[in-house]
Amino acid sequence: MGLSRFNSKLLYKYVVTYVVILLLPVMMVGFFVYQYFIQLLEDEVTRGNLNLLSQVKENVDVKMTELHNIAFHISGNTRLTPYQVTKNPFTELDTISQLRNYVSANTFISNFLLYFHGHHKVYSPYSTYDAAEFTDKIYTFENWEPEQFYRDINEAVVPHVRKSEDVRTAVGGRERYITYVMPIGPNPSDSFGTVIYLINENRFKELIKKKFEDAWSNTLILDEKGDLITSSQSMDPGKAEILLERLQANSEGQGTLNFEEREYFVFQDESAKFGWTYIALVDKDTVMLKVEQAKSRTFYGLLLLVLVGSILIFFATHMNYKPIRMLKRLADSKVNIPPGSRLGEIESIRSALDVMSENNDELNRKIERSRPALKYYLILNLLKGEYKSKDDLRGKGELAGLRLESVFYTVMVLLFPKNHGHLSVAGLPDGWCEALPQGTEVFGIEGLEAEQLVLVMGTDEAVETMEMLLKITHETLSRSLGMDVTIGVGNSYVKLEELGKSYIEACGALNYRLIKGKGSLIFFREAVSEAETNRNGYSKSQWNRLKQFIYQSDTSGIDAFLRQLIDRIRKEQLPLFMVKCICFDLINVILAILEDMELDEEALAERYPDVVKLTEFETVDDLIELVKDISADIRRIISERKESGNREPVEKMKQYIGDNFGSTQFSVQTLADELGMSASYLSRYFKEQTGFTISHYVNRLRMEKAKELLTHGEGNLQELVDQIGYGSVSGFIRKFKEQEGMTPGDYRTMKHK
């Protein structure tokens, strides 16, 4: 069973597909990005070494420039002229002192000499020496004989450098020195002396090693003729000569060089100031070790990425495959495919979808056949007041194509001659309602009485403003059908739940055809004059009186109201349809109160007749009995409320407000939740019983508490506001001043005097 979970071609197809998708970018990285990255790393190594070599060149140039500056200053020093220096023995001492000033802060120079052409002495910052014996007894050069030394310092025309060589000093030590010979004078062709700088080779090596610290590199400095001056790694003269020949053969100056069975990177730079050439030899294997390590790490990283990615892809695909496997099992069960079938997931689901599509088509056909019945049911419930708002109807009406989104709702009842066969909106002739305002919504059902069609109409205008349009519509309909059609039109209402009253009015208007004649368009207001409506109907304020009696549990007031209602019906002999309208309003008032008081109104709603049943009442006496039944139900509800402990709800409200008004969390909703009432009913009930709104009552308690704290307390206003439940100090000050005529501070000052 465990292995069967992985026995799916589709699963492995997904796994292979995703692995291939993963490999594509990895291969791109390997073949393109990887090569670019490695080349970038090699270029970085090249740039880094060239930069280091350039820094070595600049550092040496700086040091050599300092030597030129010293020579320049010596040539311009009037105390260091041939005449002044050789004037007497005391001037020689001054010459030594002057030369010492030039080297006191320069650690690059080991020693330097000043020589005047034709003289037999050389001067240093430490002493004077015989020029002919200096290289024989003081500094003995390996390849610079005394005669050659004397000739070079007398004949020097341009600065030149002698390569590093072994020198034995007077104290017996041996070191390698680089000698820089520089003529001094107004111009090179008219020089009067020579400055000879003796520089320990280690000074040059230190400049190089500050940049090239690695033992696997060698940096060479060549003079303007291409002769080796010095190198960072001491080399055998023979090997050095071979290396220079190989380097001179490398015309490009950059690249690689094989030397002594090793391959080196060659980096070259030239000083534009002195013409010296700087060459860095860097062991390629050592330098590229980091590059090779980066290559290996990148390769193994990509390999690990592919491996981990493949594992994650497999398990992720397996997890995501679970719904498909469950869907396949469900599909198999729907189309009766036995377990273990070799049928693939896609084929199983396709088979199930085919079956479901066929079933859905059959269901849609059934719905289409039942759509008229559903629409009839919805419109009938609309007339009964089952739907209180557009939202209640919207969800149910979409399926039946019933949608009412207009501002006003009106009911019209059409009465046809017998056996006319037009008892649906679809059966009416085309264009019968073209005269109505654009956007008018019209839905109809067969009436409860024979030969009637009940139309529910939604418009953005009330009936009173459409009388002429309705008359045109009536004429068009009668002319198109070739028969007299009688239409009764009820009043327009904004609330969807009052549509039933418009239906009663339309039926009443239709009954007025006995007076106005068949084939007429009769408005309810024509059947009942304005005066009769005011005299016979009940206004909103009168129904509100009944609500107030019920909310206050005033049984005597309720009995008097209903008794007066029955007396009026009997004494004034109200028309039957008017009594039906009064009963309709009375039933709706009672049911609304029960809902507002969060009481169970469903049982009573079943006992009371809906709008359709009201139209079936034949006599006024039947309706009077209905009013008496409603009166008995009201007394019973009030009695049950008193017995359940609701005799003094106002006191409970006041008690709760008194205990909690100081809390910022207090609200009408929290009070309603505590007492088990709706917030709207509670607010209305409290106002009727006390004459105050809850907010006014709470504010009065807070102000009384505030005045008490201002009189006897010492706290600041913020503490006071926190105790009485106000949201902000500024709001409290404004309210206090509005009520008391002074600020809280002035009130406290007045009370403390």
Image: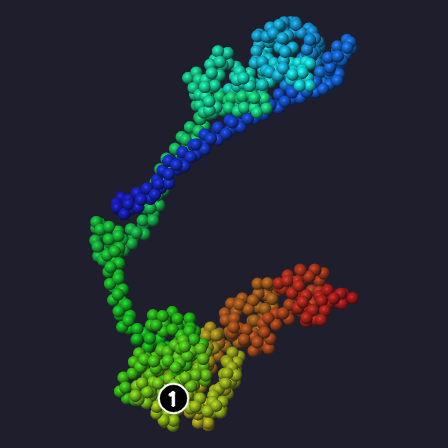
Q: Quadrant of residue 628?
A: bottom left
Q: Position of residue 625 (x, y in %)?
A: 41, 88
Q: Quadrant of the C terminus?
A: bottom right
Q: Position of residue 615 (x, y in %)?
A: 37, 86
- Residue 187 horizontal side relative to residue 213, left or right: right
Q: Residue at x 29, y 51 (%)?
A: 325
Residue nearest the observer in this picture, 422 or 48 = 48
- Residue 115 horizontal side relative to residue 50, left or right: right
Q: Quadrant of residue 445?
A: bottom left
Q: Residue at x 44, y 92 (%)?
A: 574
Q: Position of residue 643 (x, y in %)?
A: 49, 76
Residue nearest the observer in this picture, 595 or 274 = 274
Answer above or below: position of 563 versus 3.
below
Answer above or below: position of 219 versus 713.
above
Residue nearest the observer in this picture, 503 or 247 = 247
Q: Position of residue 369 (x, y in %)?
A: 27, 72
Answer above or below: position of 33 versus 213.
below
Mark 1 Cα within 10 Å, few/some/many (few <14, many 20+)? Answer: many
Does the rendering let one see residue 631? no
Q: Residue at x 52, y 20 (%)?
A: 219
What residue did someone put label 1 on? 521
- Residue 51 horizontal side relative to residue 623, left or right: right
Does the rendering let one see residue 595? yes
> Is the image coloured rainbow, by chain, by secondary structure, or in one colour?
rainbow
Question: What number of labels is visible?
Answer: 1
Q: Is label 1 in a helix, a strand or a loop?
A: strand
Q: Residue furthest front?
A: 189
Q: Residue at x 69, y 69 (%)?
A: 737
**Which kind of residue does numbered mark 1 sit on?**
Leu
Answer above or below: position of 184 versus 459.
above
Residue nearest the observer in this picture, 310 or 37 = 37
Q: Quadrant of residue 209?
A: top right
